[in-house]
Amino acid sequence: MVKPFWRIGAERSKINPTKNDGLTWYNDLGLHASGEFSMAMIQANSVMEDQCQIESGPLTFNNPAVQGTFVGVYDGHGGPEASRFIADNIFPNLKKFASEDGEVSEQVIKKAFAETDREFLMAVKKQWRTNPQMASVGSCCLAGVVCNGLVYIANAGDSRAVLGRSERGGGVRAVQLSVEHNANVESARQELWSMHPNDPSILVMKHRMWRVKGIIQVTKSIGDAYLKRAEFNREPLLPKFRLEEHFTKPILSADPSVTVTRLKQGDEFMILASDGLWEHLSNQEAVDIVHSSPRQGIARRLLKAALKEAAKKREMRYSDLKEIHPGVRRHFHDDITIIVVYLNSQMVKTNGWASPLSIRGGNSMH
Amino acid sequence: MAMKKSSKLTQTAMIKQIVRRCSSLGKKQSNVYSEDVNGHPLDVPKGHFVVYVGENRVRYVVPISFLTRPEFQLLLQQAEEEFGFDHDMGLTIPCEEVVFRSLTSSMLR
């Protein structure tokens, strides 16, 4: 049953503040422009490299009629600087381009990715003398926008967005909305080979995994300046990041794959998460958990399910895994970020009645 | 004195437990081990986890307290350099078994 709008205010009493509990950060339940949401993160690296955010309200600077929800999951590598930079800049960039065009579109989102990457590379250039290792910092970038009854999913990297869609016969089916860019995905390899037909070493199998130039598994990212411009691929950058041959064409790109889906009545929720979740849970397993559990704390419930799987793989107890310190913990699981976005069909149609909201996750973690 | 003796005994027992070889099982995948109702592997006591050592991937049950020891962290670093973090068949340590056994038994002294 659809709740009348005046009830939504009352629901806010259920909304929880964000909490930082050791290695875990979470917000168990909140309200965005088209429904409720839940967020959870856990740190495994000695420095938390994942970042995330949810923004709800106006999506432009000049037209209050364009309302919606923006969700981002940023899985950094080589350090936290790129993922933090994205969390600081991609949403303002999206608003800037949406303001110019008067609406959100696939083009607007692509421009926001390109601009954020360009700005990060500029920051790398500025710091090149004092901090050259910034050239080897990068981040996957998964962004979702719910606006006008549409959901846009833009992805550069190997995070994933999955929609939970009600089946007629009961149950909820997992529909993957994101396209992945990891060299261990066939389509990502084909794309890279076709873009670099004259480079036989564009993809190299190393440690039983395909890697771009034998170094990195993701085939698209923001940052990773050392694989985008040859000017950053030289000393004093660490030898393991340096390529022997000169290149003129960027090896990695920040151009996201975008899918646009018109939301239907039975589209109940979306799960956006870094690959740390998906290496332990399948799309359908995650969707089944969300469908069959209470909304309050659902992201933390998914996190726990993933950690239990991680413990099983190391043949140990979940209670023991929980005690392992960051750094060495990376041998047991990756940093994990999960955002569950519920889609209230009535609120999706009317484009939201919740008050503006802005939540950052991972920023306060060490 | 008695206490010392008993602690020594415990140590010996622990070393035995740690270097317990399951060589007949060593090459099997982790998921074939039997589990109790909570999904815990039956032969791994609380506070322990499993690593696979050397070319033959021999299975060892080790205490999680090892994770705080620099010597053991060095082994994990070697594993990372050799295999990255993707161990689909259990955490594999690229180190000769003899070396692993002497290192881990010295860590208990």
Image: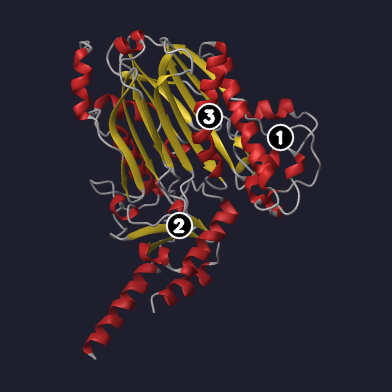
Query: Between disc 1 and disc 2, whose residue precedes?
Result: 1
The circle drawn on residue B62 is: none
Q: In the picture provided, is A115 more to the left or to the right than A172?
A: right
Quarter-of-image position of residue B63: bottom left
Would residue A225 appear left or right of B70 to someone viewing this image? right
In 3D space, how far apart are the residues under numbered discs 1 and 2 (Cα atoms)? 31 Å
Q: Position of residue A294 (x, y in %)?
A: 22, 28
Q: State whether discs 1 and 2 lie on one chain.
A: yes
Q: CA distance from mark 1 to mark 3?
A: 22 Å
**Quick one: label 1, few (<14), some, or many (20+) residues within 10 Å?**
many
Residue located beneath label 3 in the image: A90
Asked which secondary structure carries label 3, the reply is helix
Kind of residue at disc 3? Ile
Mark 1 in CB contact with mark 3 (< 8 angstroms): no
Residue position marked by numbered label 2 in the rendering: A328
What residue is pinned by disc 1? A251
Q: Residue at x 67, y 53 (%)?
A: A130
Report, in whole angstroms, how far the alpha carbon at label 3 lies from the one at label 2: 31 Å
Q: Is residue A103 above or below residue B52?
A: above
> How dense is the environment of label 2, judged by Cα within 10 Å: few (below 14), some, or many (20 and up)?
some
**Camera-side residue of A100 and A36:** A100
